[in-house]
Each structure stands twice: as structure tokens, then as C-alpha cells.
């Protein structure tokens, strides 16, 4: 990590991509509670905003897709995630909304929901919802999310996620070791 930015590196067998997140204050975050942080999840705080990034492999039968199919892959992923949140995490959500877009010839979905039961996170703060941006990076779906602690900050979080997406760099070579 650098004092002014953090760069997350995702390495595949044939390609890699980086996500650069700029900020004045960058910190690693230890989440309290029963959160299982696996190797494909990162939690950081950028200017006191918690940001989570996750990659999910695209199933083999969907790996050869066109840019038209990319939207279908993202739609399917979003449907899966919302079902997972409702059924596996047993979170009561409302006002789920998705906003598709294009950025640097790549499709993305900006999506959000409100939590009907507020969830306590670090330092007794309460998450009132969550906002995410998901995009396809080679054979992975990258999702970057921010917990909504204050509903009036939602538009600021949207802009932050789109700015993060602008800083994704794709490389068709494997990572150097």
C-alpha cells in the first residue's frame, strides 16, 4: 500500500488486472464478527470509507462470450448475488436497483439495495444498505462495494465506484513472478 493509493492485483494463468484506488488515507480493515475473509476478498478503508473488492470466476460454459453476452453474464451474476444475500445470508433487503452502463468499452452494473434490518459493523456503525459496481475482467467478475452508513452519501459512493472502475487496468499477460 502507498499513502496516496492502493493497487489491488488479480493474477490469472493467462492474464491479470489491477484496480487502483486513490485516497488521502488508506488503511487495511479487519472486520469484526463472523466474516470469512477468503483469498479473493479485500477490505480497505479509503478516506474513512470501507471498500470491499471481490472476484468471482465466470463458469466455464460462459467464458467465451461477446460484449453482448457480457451484459447477460452480469445480469445472471446479479440475480445470483441477490438470491444469495436473501437466502444464504438471510438479510432482509428492499429497493434493490440495478443501473447498467459502459466504461472503457466494458459493461458494468452499478447495483444497490437497502437493508430493512440495519446491520452493525465495525465500531458500532450501522449499515443501512450496500452499493456495488460489477464488471467482467477476463474470466472473472470483479465487484467493488461500499456499505451505505448514511443514505445521503449514496450519490458520493456511486461516483467513487465509477472512479474506481475507471482505474482498472487489464493486461493479457500473466503476472510477473
Image (cartoon, rainbow, N blue to C red):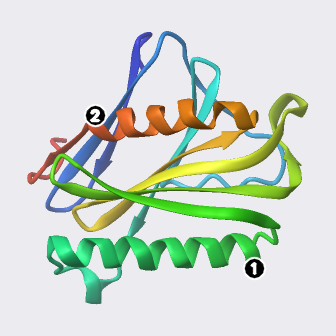
Q: Position of residue 143 (x, y in %)?
A: 45, 54
Q: Residue at x 34, y 76 (%)?
A: 73
Q: Is residue 107 left or right of residue 84?
A: left
Query: From the image, which quarter does the C terminus lie in?
Result: top left
Q: Earlier in the sequence, mark 2 or mark 1?
A: 1
Instruction: Work out whether residue 111 or residue 122 is closer to the camera in this orientation and state it.
Output: 111
**Element under disc 1:** helix
Return the x and y of residue 44 as percentages of the image width and height.
57, 32
The residue sitting at 54% across, 78% down in the picture is: 79
Q: Are marks 2 and 1 in contact (CB under 8 Å)?
A: no
Estimate the spatial distance between the alpha carbons at disc 2 and disc 1, rounded to whole Å: 33 Å
In the rendered structure, find residue 156 and report the number of the disc placed on it. Answer: none
Say above or below: 109 vs 103. Answer: below
Residue under numbered circle 2: 167
Check residue 87 in the rendering and tell me which mark sits there, or answer none. Answer: 1
Q: Position of residue 27 (x, y in %)?
A: 58, 21
Could you tell me which residue is drawn at 79 percent across and 43 percent down?
Answer: 127
Residue at the spot x=20%, y=62% of the render?
A: 13
Q: Is residue 139 left or right of residue 128?
A: left
Residue 150 location, x and y as percent? Answer: 75, 33
Q: Nearer the viewer, residue 150 or 66?
A: 150
Amino acid at each position: 500500500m502507498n499513502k496516496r493509493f492502493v493497487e489491488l492485483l488479480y493474477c490469472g494463468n493467462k492474464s491479470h488486472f489491477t484496480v487502483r484506488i486513490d485516497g488521502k488515507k488508506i488503511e487495511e480493515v479487519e472486520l469484526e464478527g463472523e466474516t470469512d475473509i477468503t483469498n479473493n476478498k479485500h477490505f480497505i478503508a479509503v478516506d474513512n470509507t470501507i471498500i470491499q473488492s471481490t472476484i468471482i470466476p465466470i463458469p466455464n460454459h460462459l467464458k467465451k462470450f461477446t460484449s453482448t453476452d457480457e451484459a447477460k453474464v452480469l445480469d445472471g451474476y446479479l440475480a445470483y448475488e441477490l438470491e444469495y444475500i436473501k437466502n444464504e445470508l438471510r438479510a432482509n433487503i428492499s429497493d434493490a436497483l440495478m443501473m447498467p452502463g459502459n466504461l472503457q468499452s466494458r459493461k458494468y452494473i452499478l447495483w444497490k439495495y437497502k437493508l430493512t434490518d440495519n446491520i452493525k459493523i465495525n465500531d458500532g456503525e450501522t449499515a443501512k444498505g450496500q452499493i456495488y459496481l460489477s464488471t467482467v475482467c477476463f474470466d472473472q467478475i470483479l465487484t467493488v462495494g461500499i456499505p451505505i452508513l448514511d443514505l445521503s452519501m449514496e450519490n458520493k459512493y456511486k461516483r467513487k465506484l465509477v472512479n474506481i472502475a475507471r482505474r482498472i487496468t487489464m493486461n493479457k499477460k500473466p503476472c510477473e513472478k
